């Protein structure tokens, strides 16, 4: 009886369907990734905080003269009775300005930063946007720790970060920019932000599983300073 069953065409059809279903399920869900970590250790920047708007290197002007009791301040030299001011006299040096050192000069500048919150998978770490001295921007993920998974991407989005299941599926509802595949589910890593990206309209970063349209974790990117 068993031999007849093995020789029946329907048996081979069912077996082929089961094998194909198992192969497809393995490809689609990739369950082994949940227990296999991929660690990245890229070198990150040491950014300085962005100075407040309207500020810059400041200095103190040295006045050209001092006030004389009972008379106007001298400006550039001492006056001789009946003659012009002598430029070589006391107070005759030109006003000078001494610029205070700029701690951010020649260093990357930290523009925005925020900590990750957990969505479908437990996620921690910090996301930050940095501008390098040439004016280019990049996203840096510092000490990221999340689950591995299929088709994970790094997205900048205009959506707010909500904790719990209410925040799992919102990041493809509005504007988003994909920076590439997630390099690893653990460690330090950086992603170039395309030139011309309007960062004023993007307020969060999501570790986005594109295959199942769900966020593993996300961080609100708040201005620094």
Image (cartoon, grey):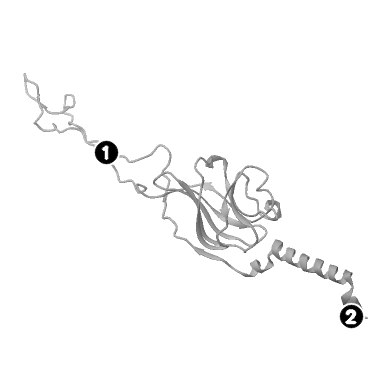
What residue does disc 1 label?
60
In front: label 1 or label 2? 2
Q: For mark 2, does the 10 Å Cα neighbourhood hold few (<14), some (14 to 19), or many (20 or more) residues?
A: few
Q: Earlier in the sequence, mark 1 or mark 2?
A: 2
- Dividing the image into 4 quarters, which one contains the N terminus? bottom right
Q: For mark 1, does the 10 Å Cα neighbourhood hold few (<14), some (14 to 19), or many (20 or more) residues?
A: few
Placement of 104 over or under 59, stated as above or below: below
Q: Quadrant of residue 90?
A: top left
Report the residue at 28% width, 39% height from top. Answer: 59
Q: Position of residue 51 (x, y in %)?
A: 41, 44
Between 172 and 158, the one nearer to me in the picture = 172
Placement of 78 over or under 222, stated as above or below: above
213 left or right of 111 in image: right
Placement of 198 over or under 7, stated as above or below: above
Outermost residue on the top side: it is: 82
The residues tagged by marks 1 and 2 sit, at their Cα atoms, a distance apart of 100 Å
101 left or right of 16 in image: left
What residue does disc 2 label?
3
Report the residue at 15% width, 28% height from top. Answer: 76
Report the residue at 66% width, 53% height from top. Answer: 210
Could you tell me which secondary element the residue under label 2 belongs to? helix
Q: Position of residue 65 (x, y in %)?
A: 17, 31
Q: Position of residue 18 (x, y in %)?
A: 80, 68
Q: Position of residue 218 (x, y in %)?
A: 60, 54
Residue 175 numbered mark, or none: none
């Amino acid at each position: 009886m068993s031999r007849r069953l093995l020789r029946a065409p329907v048996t081979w059809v069912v077996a082929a369907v089961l094998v194909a279903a198992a192969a497809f399920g393995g490809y689609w869900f990739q369950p082994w990734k949940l227990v296999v970590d991929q660690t990245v250790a890229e070198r990150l920047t040491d950014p300085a905080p962005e100075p407040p708007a309207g500020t810059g290197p400041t200095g103190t002007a040295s006045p050209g003269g001092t006030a004389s009791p009972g008379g106007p301040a001298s400006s550039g030299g001492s006056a001789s009775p009946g003659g012009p001011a002598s430029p070589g006299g006391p107070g005759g040096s030109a006003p000078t300005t001494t610029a205070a050192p700029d701690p951010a000069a020649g260093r990357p500048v930290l523009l925005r930063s925020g900590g990750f919150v957990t969505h479908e998978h437990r996620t921690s770490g910090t996301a930050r946007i940095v501008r390098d001295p040439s004016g280019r921007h990049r996203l840096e993920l510092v000490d990221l720790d999340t689950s591995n998974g299929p088709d994970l991407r790094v997205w900048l989005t205009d959506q707010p970060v909500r904790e719990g299941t209410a925040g799992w599926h919102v990041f493809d509802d509005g504007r988003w920019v994909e920076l590439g595949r997630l390099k690893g589910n653990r460690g330090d890593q950086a992603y170039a932000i395309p030139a011309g990206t309007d960062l004023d309209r993007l307020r969060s970063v999501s570790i986005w599983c594109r295959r199942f349209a769900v966020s593993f974790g996300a961080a609100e990117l708040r201005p620094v300073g």
